[in-house]
Amino acid sequence: MDIRNLLSKKVLILLIALVIVLVVVITFTSFYGMVAPKPPTFTPKVETSGKVVYIYHDGGDTLSREGTRVIVNDQVVPITALTFLNGQDWPWTPGKTLKAEYTGPGLPTTLEVQVTSGGKDLKIYSTLLREPEKGGIPVITMTPAPILTTLSPTLQVTQVEGTTPYPGTKVVTPVAPVTTSPTRFLAGPPLADFTANPLSGPTPLTIWFSDRSIGVAQTWFWSFGDGETSTQPNPVHTYSRGGSYTVSLTVSNQYGVNTKTTPGLIMVGLTPQTSFSASVRNGTAPLMVQFTDTSTGGPMGWLWDFGDNTSATQQNPLHLYPSPGTYQVALSTWNQFGGDMLALAEYITVAPIALTDIYLYDGKWGNLSPDGYISFRVTGPGSWIKIGGTQRTFEPGDIVQLFIGSTTKFQVDIEDGMVLIFASDPVRMFVNGRLIATGSVSGIKVYSTDSMRSTLVLNIPPEDTFAQLMVNNRRVVERQGHGLLFTNFRMDSDGDFDLTVSEGYIYVKAGVERYEEV
């Protein structure tokens, strides 16, 4: 074969191969260049108020300021007319609400959200907000379904073809009801109910209200407490002035009307106004006082100064004044909007008490008045009591009250602030004002206390002529047929409180607030 003809054939084959490769490359590039980029996911909830559209990002991807367009009634909303509620900003992430202010003619009827991806504008959401020819009625229908045992009709929302569901509704596919004989349809007025979010914040504060009424409501009337109202089922309302607002919702249908009112539901930009009260303001030492916060304005924090170099952060503290004196009480309160303080000079007065030392022995008969108690404040670690078979420990600062259960069998021994014996059956024990345990005391060790007092009252009848008595270290020789009454036992001048009451044996070494022959 001629060498030139052979070379010509090889060149021709090479050229054909190159053409085929070029065609494949051009076809591949053209095909894949035409494939639209995948749009981001976006699930919103939408509400309108006049010419304002609120779009809540309920789930999906993050949207950027530069790549997002909001279109209302085929008109692009300027980026300057797009703001986030509650001081938030771009990017648009789930949980944020975008406020779009429409400035075109009429009310918003259509909404579209677009993003720019791959150099192209992609529509990621669109909905019909109102039907213009019907004056802006939401595009949903609510139909009561036959039911058997529930107290209200079942709501079904039917989606209009070509639209997305109305915010806050659940689209269900109508199905034939399952019926048994007999079948009945229960109809009646709706029962009003609603939620609001958020419930508090700085001014201006925008709230999403949601109808949660039971039954089929056909009309809605909201009163927001600031003079403004709405007839939408799920309105969005902005409070421009600080205050506490009462919200009510009235719903109705052909069967009747129902209203729900929630006083003080919305708190807008209020700082607290501090005030307080006390259970007692005067008494003898030690004096127990229950303080109660009566502040208004929704305080979230409290700081009490009791005037005796102690403080507390509870809203309603119980405080013990162990020593005589006159005390100023101050309370500071605050919330996210600010704080307030109230100080009342000479608010609590604690007087000293004159005690009588009593020493009684060889007594045979006597009894305690019912419901008396001994109280003290624990001042050191390691203290405990075994009551009802369970050992319980005390913390320093605990205020303990032990109520006696028997009026004829009782024993207590306290020496220099150490509680060594407390025996009664049963006993009710309160710690810091709360009932902690009830039962028999089988052991107790409280190593250090202060502010000990009691309401125990001991009566020795006239028939007990065996009892020998000394008052303030002086012997009482003649009782002339009188009984003895000792009221409110305390520690004596030696720091002792020893009292035993049992059948055939009475013994006392203690101080008392009052002693008398009766």
Image (cartoon, rainbow, N blue to C red):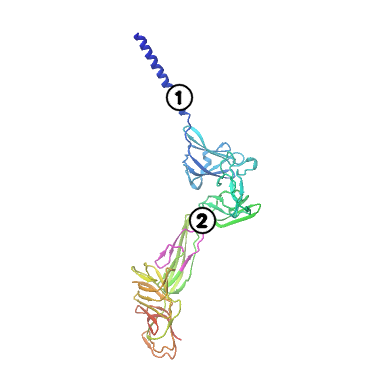
Whether 294 is drawn above or below 128: the answer is below
- Give the quadrant of residue 446: bottom left
Instruction: Using the numbered discs, state the Cα–Cα distance from disc 2 to disc 1 in whole angstroms.
Output: 68 Å
Q: Is residue 175 rendered to the left or right of residue 335?
A: right
Residue 227 seen: no
Ranked by sequence position, the earlier of labels 2 and 1 is 1
Q: Callout 1: helix, strand or loop?
A: helix
Residue picked out by circle 1? 27
Badge 2 crowding class, 10 Å Cα cut-off, few under 14, some 14 to 19, many 20 or more, is many
Place of residue 474 in the rendered image (x, y in percent of width and height, measured from the top left): 37, 87
Residue 83 seen: yes
Q: Residue 121 or 185: which is nearer the viewer? A: 185
- Which dot, 2 or 1, sits closer to the camera? 1
- Give the quadrant of residue 490: bottom left
Disc ID at residue 270: 2
- Based on the picture, tell me whether residue 250 belongs to the magenta stretch: no
- Give the quadrant of residue 350: bottom left
Q: Residue 300 or 306: which is nearer the viewer? A: 300
Whether 285 is drawn above or below 209: the answer is below
Magenta-colored span = 290-315
Q: Is residue 12 rendered to the left or right of residue 258?
A: left
Residue at 48% from the left image edge and 70% from the top image edge: 279
> The N terminus appears in which quarter of the rendering?
top left
Residue at the limit of the structure toward the front, as seen here:
181
Q: At label 2, which amino acid type do we have? A: Leu
- Based on the picture, tell me whether residue 310 belongs to the magenta stretch: yes
Q: Callout 2: helix, strand or loop?
A: loop
Q: At label 1, which amino acid type do we have? A: Thr
Place of residue 14 in the rendered image (x, y in percent of width and height, measured from the top left): 38, 17
Place of residue 65 in the rendered image (x, y in percent of width and height, measured from the top left): 48, 39
Badge 1 crowding class, 10 Å Cα cut-off, few under 14, some 14 to 19, many 20 or more, is few
Place of residue 321 in the rendered image (x, y in percent of width and height, measured from the top left): 41, 71
